[in-house]
Amino acid sequence: VYAANNPSSNGATMMSYGARDGQQSVTLGMTRQITPNLRWNMKYGYFQNRDNTSGFHNDFDAQVVTTGLQYRF
């Protein structure tokens, strides 16, 4: 989890006036040994971004699912 109250790096010319942003993410993975030579895996991720420094135009929620099959010979 990432969150920041982000004051401007150039405080003499700009002020943040409570500008805040935040990011959250969760990832999970699972691996299954099917046979001694065959392995399957699956991963899930959820990502959230909140950015009110640009009028909430960069807000998003994303979900990702990946899967893989590995054969060793």
Image (spheres, rainbow, N blue to C red):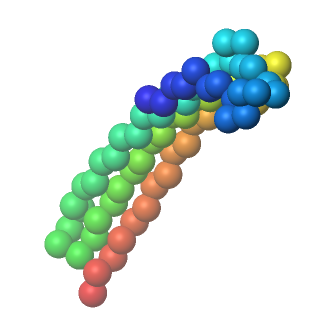
Q: Quadrant of the C terminus?
A: bottom left
Which residue shows up at 36% across the image and 71% down it? Answer: 70
Which residue shows up at 76% across the image and 27% down it? Answer: 12
Question: Residue 33's x, y, as percent?
Answer: 22, 61
Q: Quadrant of residue 31?
A: bottom left
Looking at this view, is 58 or 34 the one in front? 58
Q: Quadrant of residue 63?
A: top right
Residue 35 horizontal side relative to residue 18, left or right: left
Q: Could one spot residue 53 in this view of the protein?
A: no
Residue 12 horizontal side relative to residue 33, left or right: right
Q: Quadrant of the N terminus?
A: top left
Question: Residue 72's x, y, as percent?
Answer: 28, 81
Q: Most extreme residue toward the left, as rendered?
A: 36
| Residue 58 in the image: above or below residue 19 | below
Residue 15 horizontal side relative to residue 26, left or right: right
Q: Most extreme residue toward the front, as rendered?
A: 12
Residue 34 horizontal side relative to residue 69, left or right: left
